[in-house]
């Protein structure tokens, strides 16, 4: 194994950075899903809906990766 692979396999990363990345990606995904549901006429696109869905995704991701 190379020294990069040794370091990468042992590094868990900074939890704050991982949380921010998780929050950003969850918000983008939630916005896409809510936009799609709005496009289909199922759910109106509102920022509180997007942020609520994103919060649920962040919580689920935290529980799954814990």
Image (spheres, rainbow, N blue to C red):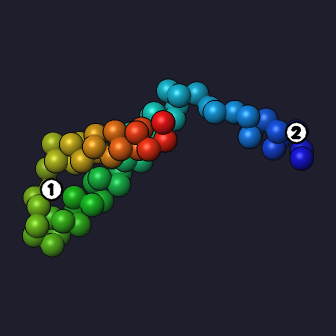
Query: Seen in the image, is 6 located left or right of residue 35?
Result: right
Q: Residue at x 88, y 39 (%)?
A: 3
Circle 2 crowding by C-alpha within 10 Å: few under 14, some 14–19, many from 20: few
- The image shows residue 1 at horizontal and vertical percentages of 89, 47
Marks 2 and 1: CB-CB under 8 Å?
Answer: no
Please tell me whether mark 1 sits on a helix, a strand or a loop: loop
Circle 1 crowding by C-alpha within 10 Å: few under 14, some 14–19, many from 20: some
Q: Residue at x 63, y 33 (%)?
A: 12
Q: Nearer the viewer, residue 54 or 65?
A: 65
Foreground label between 2 and 1? 2
Residue sitting at the far bottom: 40
- The image shows residue 31 at horizontal and vertical percentages of 28, 54
Q: Residue at x 22, y 58 (%)?
A: 34
Q: Residue at x 18, y 65 (%)?
A: 37
The answer to whether residue 42 of the structure is visible from this angle is yes
**Tag on residue 45?**
1
Query: Seen in the image, is 25 located left or right of residue 53?
Result: right
- The image shows residue 45 at horizontal and vertical percentages of 15, 56
Is residue 36 shown above or below 66?
below
The answer to whether residue 21 of the structure is visible from this angle is no
Distance from Cα at disc 2 to Cα at disc 1:
48 Å
Give residue 59's quadrant in the image: top left
Give residue 56's quadrant in the image: top left
- The image shows residue 32 at horizontal and vertical percentages of 30, 59
Q: What residue is pinned by disc 2?
A: 3
Q: Nearer the viewer, residue 42 or 11?
A: 11
**Tag on residue 31?**
none
Count how many numbered circles sit on residues in the image: 2
Please tell me whether mark 2 sits on a helix, a strand or a loop: helix
Badge 2 or badge 1: first in the primary sequence? 2
């Amino acid at each position: 194994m190379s020294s990069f692979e040794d370091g990468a396999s042992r590094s868990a990363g900074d939890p704050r950075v991982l949380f921010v990345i998780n929050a950003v990606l969850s918000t983008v995904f939630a916005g896409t899903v809510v936009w799609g549901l709005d496009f289909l006429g199922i759910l109106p696109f509102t920022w509180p809906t997007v942020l609520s869905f994103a919060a649920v995704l962040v919580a689920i991701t935290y529980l799954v990766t814990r």
